Image (cartoon, grey):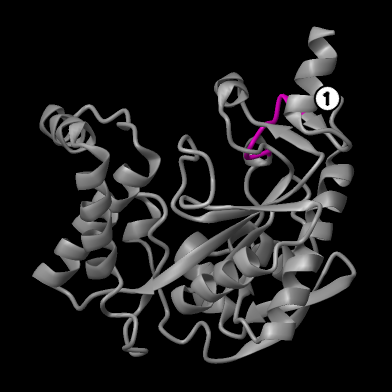
Amino acid sequence: MDTIDMKMVWKHEQEILDLFHKICIENKFRYSLGYGTLLGAIRHNGFIPWDDDIDIIMPRRDYDCFISFWNNNPIDGYILQDEYNSRDDYPNNFCKLRKDHTTFIQDKKEMIKKYHKGIFIDIFPMDRVAPKGIQRKLQFIAFSVYMLLSRDYCDNSKNTAYLLIQKVLLAFPKSIKRIIKQLTFHFMTKWNKNNSYQLVVPCTFAFSKMYYPNDLFNRIIKKEFNKKKYLITENYDGFLKAMYGNYMQLPPECDRTWKHTPIIVDYKHNFEELRVSIEE
């Protein structure tokens, strides 16, 4: 960790962000900087000094359009990675845009994975939250099942019954799991046409219970981030308060640490290329 130059990681991440921004502007895809990246733009005019990644949020429709555009117009030197076009062991139900011929390994377990492991930015889709009551509870169940089948492994739940349900679902044949994913996806996104409902990022269990103002994408503005301008929601205050509370207050020094804590970073080689050189 002490030998990794965070500014070099930022440099490559911002290069990916520049490309993403250009595509979105040219094709009128809505997006906003999100999470720590949005907080960094507001509080620091750039990266939070101890943050190590870039997060993007998009309405589901724009997110799908971006993926479709990329699949039809891939750009050499970059990899768009999602649950459909990536290797079977890609564990996320959101996409990453990675820079080819780079490496960002977060832990030893990732070293054996087959998916591309270059420096990346995270792109999260947002869906509309169902009305309160049974519909919202069922939507959360749909979120949970969809996430489980996307990552294809059980979490570390201490709830025996919940763990058993996960194992049963994962034991189904691939064809059945594919049908269940399609059904849960249809259900969890069925409220997206109603702009009066709140927004949610259904990409982790914690995120799926965190609701944001319904107007995040009504108006998008430009904001400086690390000496360049990108798009953010005009209602950044509503997003950041929902996520962090008093977001202008700095966290204790003990919490100012890297989120991904990489063990291997390389700016010129894919991990497979590094592996060959190491073995030689």
| Residue 55, horizontal then vertical, whole percent | 63, 59
Which residue corresponds to mark 1?
2
Mark 1, Cα crowd under 10 Å, few <14 / some 14-19 / many 20+, is few
Identify the image quadrant of residue 167: top left
Which image quarter holds the N terminus?
A: top right
Does the segment drawn in magenta span residue 258? yes
Measured along the vertical axis of the image, is residue 194 above or below residue 17?
Answer: below
Q: Residue 94, image x and y in percent?
A: 49, 55
Residue 261 in the image: above or below residue 148: above
Horizontal relation, residue 37 to residue 230: left or right: left
Tell me the magenta residue range.
Answer: 257-264
Q: Is residue 280 magenta?
A: no
Tell me the kind of residue under disc 1.
Answer: Asp
Residue situated in front as seen by the camera: 225 or 150: 150
Query: Magenta segment, principal secondary structure?
Result: loop
Q: Residue at x 80, y 22 (%)?
A: 274
- Quadrant of the image for the C terminus? top right
